[in-house]
């Protein structure tokens, strides 16, 4: 089975993206530039005893995504404990709403955002009372 084991977020400004993901989601970073041969920061997204994967920020190798175009690639969704507080942090640190919060009835709250680099990502708060 081909399970996802790593992700990469392509960024224009490494410091800006590091600050965004560090402040919004509490990620920490390790400099793996020497291994990758380009600006590349390993992203630790949580402790080893919780479900999830780690990934990286890497220097974008082509043009930035254009606004209002179809998504090309994968959209990662982060689990959050408090949807509204997470959205407030996203907006505070330079993110934008791409698709507003909506209910997955009886399951969760979901929504999508643009990071400071123009990449789309989602947040998801489990809530069996969502409607």
Image (tube, helix red, strand yellow):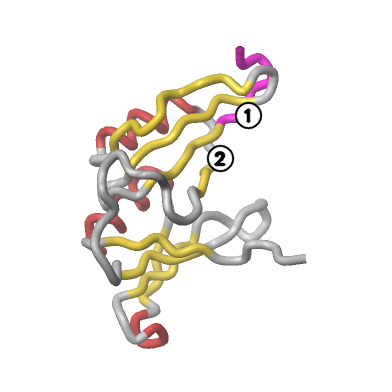
Q: Is residue 99 left or right of residue 91?
A: right
Q: How many marks?
A: 2
The tag on residue 23 is none
Q: Is residue 41 left or right of residue 16?
A: right
- The reply to whether the C-beta atoms of the residues labelled 1 and 2 are less than 8 Å apart is yes
- Is residue 23 part of the magenta span, yes or no? no
Q: Which residues are magenta?
A: 125-131
Quick check: 39 above or below 10?
Answer: below
Q: Which residue is mark 2?
A: 79
Q: Position of residue 122 (x, y in %)?
A: 47, 39
Q: Which residue is mark 1?
A: 126
Q: Is residue 8 left or right of residue 128?
A: left
Measured Cα–Cα span from mark 1 to mark 2? 8 Å
Quick check: 54 above or below 24?
Answer: below
Q: What's the residue at 43%, 54% (across, down)?
A: 72
Q: Position of residue 33 (x, y in %)?
A: 34, 81
């Amino acid at each position: 089975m081909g399970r996802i084991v790593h992700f990469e977020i392509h960024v224009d400004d490494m410091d800006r993206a590091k600050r965004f993901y560090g402040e919004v989601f509490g990620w920490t970073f390790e400099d793996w530039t020497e291994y990758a041969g380009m600006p590349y920061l390993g992203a630790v997204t949580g402790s080893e005893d919780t479900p999830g994967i780690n990934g990286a920020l890497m220097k974008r190798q082509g043009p930035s995504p254009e606004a209002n175009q179809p998504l090309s690639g994968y959209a990662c969704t982060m689990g959050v404990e408090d949807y509204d507080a997470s959205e407030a942090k996203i907006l505070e640190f330079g993110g934008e709403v791409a698709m507003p919060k909506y209910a997955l009835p009886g399951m969760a709250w979901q929504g999508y955002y643009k990071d400071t680099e123009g990449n789309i990502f989602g947040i998801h708060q489990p809530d069996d009372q969502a409607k």
